[in-house]
Image (cartoon, coloured by chain):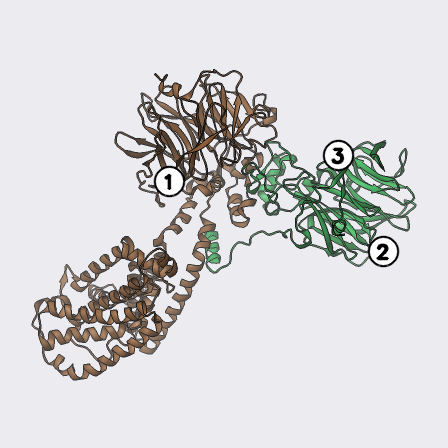
Amino acid sequence: MAVSDMLLRLRYRIVPDRLFGELLTKSWIDNVIPVLVLAVTVLVMTVLIPGYLSTGNMADLGRQVAEFGLIAIALTIVILSGGIDLSVGSVFALTVLTALVCMNVLGVPIGVALAATLGVGLVCGLLNGVLVGYLRLRAFITTLVTLVIFRAIYDIVFPKLASAIVASMPSSFLWDYIGFGNVVGIPISFLIFVAIALVVHIVLSRMRPGWRLRAVGGARRSAFNAGINVKLTVCMAYAASGVLTAMAAFLFSARLGSTGADTGIGLEIVILTAVVLGGVSLGGGRGSVGGAIIGTVLVLILSNSLIRMAVPGSLNQLILGVVLVAAVLFDVKWVKNRGKILSKVYVSPTYLALKERPRVAEDPVLAVNDRLGDAQQIGVGAVEGPEDVILDRDGNLYTGTRHGNIVRFFAPDYNTHEIFARVGGHPLGLAFTRDGDLVTCVGGMGVYRVTPDGTVHKVTDETNRSALSIIDDSRLRLPDDLDIAPDGRIFFSEATIRYEMSEWAVDALEGRGNGRLLCFDPKTGTTRTLLRGLVFPNGITVCRDGQSLLFAETWACRIMRYWFDGPNKGKRETFVDNLPGYPDNVNRASNGGYWVALLGMRTKTFDLAMRKPGFRRRMAKRIAADEWLFPNINRGCVIRMTADGTITDSYWDADGEKHPSITSMREHKGYLFLGGVSNNRIGRVRIADADPDWTAPDDYWGDAE
Amino acid sequence: MSGLITSLMRNLLGYSDTGISIPPMDNMFKPNNRLEAAKIVTRIDGLDDIAPTTDGFLCSARDALLRVSLGPDGARVEKLDRLDGAITFLAARADGELALATEKRGLRIGRPGAWRSVELPEDQARCLTAGCFLPDGSLTLCVGSVRNPASAWKRDLMQHGASGCVFSIAPDCGSVRMLADGLGFPYGIVSLEDGALAVSESWRHRVLRVETEAKSVRPAPMLSNLPAYPARIAPSAEGGYLLALFAPRRQLFEMILIEDEYRMEMMETIDPSEWVGPDLRQTDDPDQPLQQGSVRQMGILKPWAPSRSYGLVVRCDASMTPVESWHSRADGTRHGITATCERGGVVFAASKGAGELLHLSDEREGAQ
């Protein structure tokens, strides 16, 4: 191997390119940039302002974060619902007044004061909510109006009570504790805030009300069509906003114990800046509590530092405004282009070198022949996408179709057929259990069992999540083929964990070990991943020793043997390497060997492309998927191997029109049945030297009594 | 990593790696099945160039010069001469004088059995792709490439060939005059009404106007951005021209042409018959490359699949604007059209891919 090739291989082994695309699929990626900006800001301020990271300063910041953060969460909830709440500043002022009047003037117990404060906030929020949610007024103009109304009420009431508030001090220990208390140096108000933020975060991201809120904000009409009560959801968002703002006001009152004419003025713009900086999209539906908090901290640090650096107040406002515009601009671009970036960087090809192979035409065993040319055509047009075919003890033929059915053709002539079961997804691999149940791998769904009367039961659709995987690999995306061990364990392959069924071709372009081998144990009812990092593991067949199995790694053009029991348990070795084509299903043959379906043949140009990951990546980016270079999967064949892996026969359809690509074959009583995942028929051809009495169920489970 | 960041930023700002686009088959190039439905005049394996005569055609097919006579009971093919190698072009003058060339021995003028060799530099002589007699008796010739012989056209394309030229030879075979050079595989030539020449420049997908008199005037494109690689041009009796296009352009091919590393290794290590790139015919060979859209689905190869070969004949008006086209699409076989001609108001085309001489129907016949 050339040095450049070795370097290339090393580079693709070390640099995990694919992780970048996988990170972009995560929803928390929206928060990464605000966090980075925050880190940079803190760093800059630490350098610029001496003693910036002092405990006192941090505690002060903590209290401010608690108050501002609650309002930011309030606004986040409203913006998530697709609206906006400009009245938070006035609601804040009004509820601060309520809290102080209750504590200082009326002298009621703190619990009552809290209830009254939250009550006023709820009423203010409900007013907004009813106007926007039920009466369908525009959120912007409505909350602008309520901003003015609430502020007017405050301006009328405040002067009359101002002196009374200042005149008396409440004698509540709890009140003072909330305002000034610390637990191991952390302000108590900050702890309250953290608790509330956690609850809201869980509700928004993990519970139904949160999902509904996002749905309404993201696509109002779709949410309505999905049966969500849109009006109620919107109304409740404003109500929640009012309550959270009131909570912030309560903490603020406890800390300061007084209020002024300018309380809450301009607050909405500060909070809005914080929320947008935190990645909450003004378009609705996107954003998180975490983001809102990050934005709040960022804005507070920025404005506090500017004050400490003696920047005039007006300039301070100007800077905040510029930051807001920049954040909005970035948000718009990010939301618009994130999907585009993702689609471009997700495909991440890697280096895959296959050994040189002589031309098929020069190989006496593999040269194109026409043994499949006169195959009987079964179900032309009646089945679409028969990936796998299988026969029961009575000789009836079963196959899955892309319409989500399992179709049964009746022996002996296979001219009539019926829908045996409706599964709902495209059934790929098929296998019979000892009891005659049909077990199938269903693309995009999992492993399912069909009883002889046609009822469908789920076997498994998830496995253990691996600790270091970024994408969630606990769900089965593309279970492909399966076989059943003598003790009933189901071994199955999942071709790729990075792509859905419809995108399997993209996995070919990557050429990475994205697939895995799994085992479902009916005794425990659990599924476990046995092997990871397999290159499109496809066909599986249990060997006659009952302790090992063969599985095909399609893009690597090899068949591996894996021992799941016995003295060699856990051992994996190459069974056949450097095949002339891409192996799909592997099944037992009557002569003691195995049949292998080659779904397509290798071409030198594609082998070369597999050694050029950069070329494939650019191809995926620059040209349409239909134009991508591919292996020649218009030419497939079936090969027969001995039990030790020597290829002895090949079966071709010379003109490649009836069976261009072959993904499965089963031998039954001297005949070979052929399936193809992109074909619309099943083929049946006589094998001259086969045992005319051999059937797979007998070979697996012994003669039927 | 810096590349990743740059591309991230470009994506973020709404720019992206420019996609590769090729002109769509649209408007006058809208696909039809007329070439696939055309009548066969005769099958001639390896058919390449054709020239009309009074009673039929002269054809070149591999090393043979053939005469096809059209009679009431079908076409009759007779062999006139066998040469020392594949004939790379054929041109006929009204008085019956012929010009043809082979890779080995270069240009010959005369009649079957009485050829006069014309001395040309060897690198030009082995890639004479088209020729045309002018009214004054002089012969104009296209040299596809001076780097590669005519049969290695795929290699020339992959090398970004731009070494082709057009020159004329005086009637006495004496003086040779260069008319244009630095061309990307000129593959067809025809005399325009005003005395200038139209030359198809394959690798740049266009037809150029080449002046015969004013030497300082640079060739100017008459028709550019073709969706396929043009081959030979023939005059039409109505004053227009017939353009044969021998292979399709595909996004993947254009991409291979800018992917230097892949292309170089492909040229070094793989047989040209298995290269990714345009070709004259589809084969069933399992070693052939495939594009995803060409995968046979449910027993059918889609006609719009991105095949490596295609059949296309275009009729242009006197100003070289396309007015009509005949297609054989991905699911057809009449691919690799290398020459056309008009005889008695009927268009004939040579499909090198299928080895067939075709009689094309006229759209206006159906309209009447």
Image: B164 above or below A77: above
List the residue tagged with mark 3.
B46
Q: How many marks?
A: 3
Q: Residues within 10 Å of mark 1 (few under 14, many from 20)?
A: many
x, y percent for residue B8: 46, 55
Judging by colour alone, the chain drawn in green in this rendered image is: B
Q: Residues within 10 Å of mark 2 (few under 14, many from 20)?
A: some
In this view of the protein, which residue sits in the foreground, B236 or A542? B236
Query: Which label sits on residue A383?
Result: none
Q: Amino acid at mark 2?
A: Gly
The residue that appears at 37% across and 65% down in the rendered structure is A282
Q: Residues within 10 Å of mark 3 (few under 14, many from 20)?
A: some
Q: CA distance from mark 2 to mark 1?
A: 71 Å
Image: A695 above or below A237: above
In this view of the protein, which residue sits in the foreground, A554 or A604? A554
| Circle 1 chain | A
List the residue tagged with mark 1.
A445
The residue at the far front in this view is A416
Q: In screen coordinates, is B265 left or right of A188? A: right
